[in-house]
Image (spheres, rainbow, N blue to C red):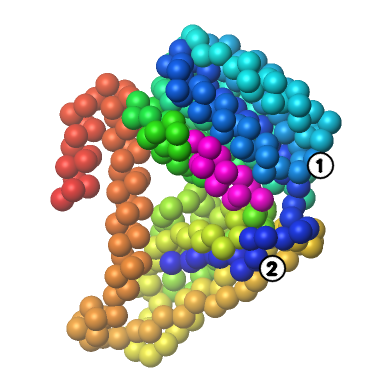
Amino acid sequence: RLSLKTLAAKERSDRAPINVALVIDRSGSMSGDRIAAAKKGAHVALERLDADDIVSLVAYNHEVDVLAETGRLGTKRDALDRAIDKLVASGTTALHAGVKEGGEQVKAHLSDLKVNRVVLLSDGLANVGPSSPAQLAELGRALAAKGISVSTIGLGLDYNEDLMQRLAAASDGNHVFVERPSDLAEIFDREFGDALSVAARDIIIQIECKAGFTPKRVLGREAEIEGSRVTLKLNQLPAETERYVVVELDASASGLASGEGEVASVAVDYLDLASGNRANARSQVTARFTEDAKEAEASINKRVMSQVTEQLATENSEKAVEHRDAGDLTAARQVHADTAA
């Protein structure tokens, strides 16, 4: 289990500037309390930002409208507030197109030294244009490749959790479920608190396994495995936040039966937003070997094994969703039954 956690303080006077697109679902299902709460939450978000932060506002139903082009907040705060107040709910839901346009707005001021983010609020299902979890995850990966994260806020009990969770996860963004519209302002406040605290970006992790240890797979994140080397990338890491992955190794060719041995070296290279410079960290992985089955059993790290189980369940859940979306409910049920077993 490899984990990263930044130690930077959350409150920094020299925090990195934010480049954000607010993307708000204004389809018919958002009418009433929901669109009113979305407006309030968007106003709260603007209050957390400084004059030099970059902001745009995108709203979508079956069509996508850029209500405020990307630019410095200091020159357009009043215009943004007026655009938010004019939001009206109607129509169907082109979620993919809305997020894609939000990404385009962020790209206009893209910078390695900014926190580049799309924040999506939706209460429904994507029903216009690309609409599967896999398609939205692919959009998330494409934006992540540009250094843009997508945070998704699901409102109410009817939205597609699989879709919005995978979109966020693919780009290292946050995903949160909000049951009551009245909680939205607090959620927006928390989301922008997270954006304000991002400490590291463009994080590259390389794990070099020693002779006799073969990497088999990585759980919890996409990774490249080439021979003995595992390479992973993280878009960003907020202050005081932990991200982890689990790497499965085959040690059968190590030839070690007892004592300690080196397993792998880990190198982490990242952009430190506080200094504006690239930095690095290094670590070594060792393991203890024994031929005593009871000793091996007693040494099992239950926390890690519970995370392995959780990651495997997540992978299986995604497979079940793909079967369900393809109309094969029998296969979807079987995957869940196998997971439970």
Secondary structure character of the magenta stretch overall = helix
Where is mark 2, residue-wise?
A: 280
Q: Position of residue 190 (x, y in %)?
A: 55, 47
Q: Nearer the viewer, residue 321 or 47?
A: 47
Q: Nearer the viewer, residue 307 or 70?
A: 70
For image coordinates 65% across by 71% down, the residue present is 281
Q: CA distance from mark 1 to mark 2?
A: 29 Å
Residue 49 position (above or below residue 236): above
Q: Position of residue 301 (x, y in %)?
A: 32, 73
* First in sequence: mark 1 vs mark 2: 1
- Residue 113 colored in magenta in the image: no
Q: Is residue 291 left or right of residue 1?
A: left
Task: Tell which residue pokes out farthest to the bottom in this image.
Answer: 259
Residue 25 position (above or below residue 270): above
The amino acid on which the numbered mark 2 sits, given as a three-letter code, is: Asn
Secondary structure beneath disc 2?
strand
Residue 130 position (above or below residue 55): above
For image coordinates 74% across by 55% down, the residue present is 15
Residue 330 visible within the image: yes
Q: Position of residue 2 (x, y in %)?
A: 48, 66
Where residue 302 is drawn, which disc sits there?
Answer: none
Task: Tell which residue pokes out farthest to the top in this image.
Answer: 91
- Residue 194 colored in magenta in the image: yes
Q: Is residue 8 left or right of residue 170?
A: right
Residue stretch in magenta: 184-196
Q: Splitting the image into 4 quarters, where does residue 217 fall?
A: bottom left
Where is mark 1, residue-wise?
A: 52
Q: Nearer the viewer, residue 152 or 323?
A: 152
